[in-house]
Amino acid sequence: MRNVFFIARRELEAYFASPIGWIALCAFLLVTGFFFASMVGFFALQTTEFGMSPYQDIDLSQHLVAPFYSNTGLVLLMLCPALSMRLFAEDRRQRSLEMLLTSPVRTVEIVLGKYFGGMGFVLVMLLATAHYPLILWWIGEPDLGVVISSYLALLGVAGSVMAVGLVASAATESQMVAFVVSFVLSLLFWVASWADASASGTLGEVLSYLSMLSHMDELGKGLLHVKDLVYYVSFIAVALFATHQRVEAFRWR
Amino acid sequence: MIVAEHLTKRYGTTLAIDDVTFEVQKGEVVGFLGPNGAGKTTTMRILAGSLGATSGRALIDGLDVFESPLETRRRVGYLPEVPPLYPNMTVNGYVRFAARIKGAVDLDAAVDRVLGRVGLADMGGRLVGHLSKGFQQRVGLAQALVHDPEVLILDEPTSGLDPAQRKEIRDLVKDLAGERTVILSTHVLPEVEDVCQRVLIIAGGRIVASDAIDALAGGERFVRVRVGRPGPELEAALAAIEGVTECSPEGEGRYAIRTREDRRAEVARTAACWDLLELTGRERLEDIYLRLTSGKNA
């Protein structure tokens, strides 16, 4: 399993050796920074307005932390396909996949290496947002549990989108196709719960369970349920298994 | 060292290789020849482990490439037709990565040794994507050699290179011969005569010849002469020389002569009377190659 680490490390370094990593990191910080600044401003306005009313209680965790991280999740939903699209498609186009396939490395090690390499970059992006909660502690007292579970939710969302992106990237030689396919699939999984209003009964429940958004919301409230973790882990596992089968199929075409 | 037994590969309905069987002894350098699309790359990829055969089996050092893929891949260094490079990495970084995933022992020493061997010792800090084609080919070769494999499989290692670079790669392969078992595919036939002891010729997915170059010729020699005053008398005189089996005019005073043994001296003496201008031993391998592959895989 040392090979997983070697491949992951190469993938992580590749993000920093090409513009895509730096562009994604800057875009991520720019957009979340904008969200953060405007939401803090709006929250300040709300507190002064409702502060006089004895009936309204404005809570930092519920009215600022949760919506902020929910929006950050949406940004990740759009950026992660741009990060995952190159993982296999680039290797296929420049024929370097042939080296991985003829090295004494198991297919599962290639898949996990690529996935963890991509997730390593996601981790770098999330660490780069650490100043937002620090600022919140400076201005108020957000619930630590909500912050931690929000980050877990972001990791779950990014992990799922990256896993879908990995399948798409293995399925095509074109990075553009991989991007569009993984973005559309992720978006559908994100909003699947919207249909549960019109789809009644079992179908509605299934759609609601499949939706990333509903699991994200639970975690965003600071509620750490096993079912949400099971959802993300199984989602990722299914996508990685599909990738494995796809890569293994390269040997049999 | 390398054994292919009844290898067959089908892509959908097309048959890429059909019942390919051959054996390569330890330390041998074998030239793998055949027209484009004859199945050379398919066969090499099966041996290297990046492609599964539809039927038949391939053994490296007695181990089946399908049953013990990791062990056989550890013993094989493979350079595909397009070198498998990461253009955004430095030469050093790339070769180190290759050394790691191929399980090279003593990383630093292995990388230094292989970079010295392929002549990239001062290029370690350069980006792979910025190198010329010849240097990229050497990086590809470094990747194949870094884990010190016993078997080398090189798919057209000299294609697209200039004559000087071709000679460098050829010398490198000659240098590697002896300690390693090498299969090398190429379209440059003099290269094969220079480097290889034995040739495998594949056409239409089947092995049509597998022997030492001299044995393939069956003791036949080829001579081509050019004279100043061609004519039917000369043709008759040449054909009358003992050991000449065939003499065919090729126009402009040129004659192609096939002989059983070396009859160059007699041919020269005869042709001198008709103003001999040139006498050359023809490319034997080219003749054999064209004879064996014509009509197949057109």
Image (cartoon, coloured by chain):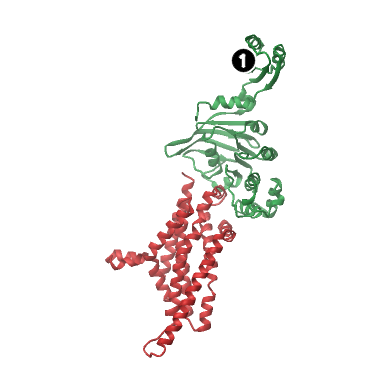
Chain colours: A red, B green
Identify whether A98 is placed above or below B33: below
Residue B198 horizontal side relative to residue B20, left or right: right
Quadrant of res A189: bottom left
Foreground: B290 or A4?
B290
Q: Mark 1 points at which residue?
A: B247
Which residue sits at x=33%, y=67%? A194
Quadrant of res B83: top right
Identify whether B198 is placed above or below A25: above
Q: Is residue A224 visible?
A: no
Chain under label 1? B
Residue A200 in the image: x percent, y percent? 27, 66
Residue B116 horizontal side relative to residue B18, left or right: right
Q: Can residue A52 be seen in this view?
A: yes
Foreground: A52 or B286?
A52
At mark 1, the secondary structure is strand
The quadrant of the rendering that contains the N terminus of chain B is top right
Residue A68 horizontal side relative to residue B113, left or right: left
Foreground: B95 or A29?
A29
Q: Callout 1: 10 Å neighbours few (<14), some, many (20+)?
A: some
Quadrant of res A1: bottom right
Residue B79 in the image: x percent, y percent? 60, 43
Identify whether A238 is placed above or below A225: above
Residue B100 in the image: x percent, y percent? 62, 54
Which residue sits at x=49%, y=59%? A84
Residue A127 in the image: x percent, y percent? 54, 70
The residue type indicated by label 1 comes to Cys
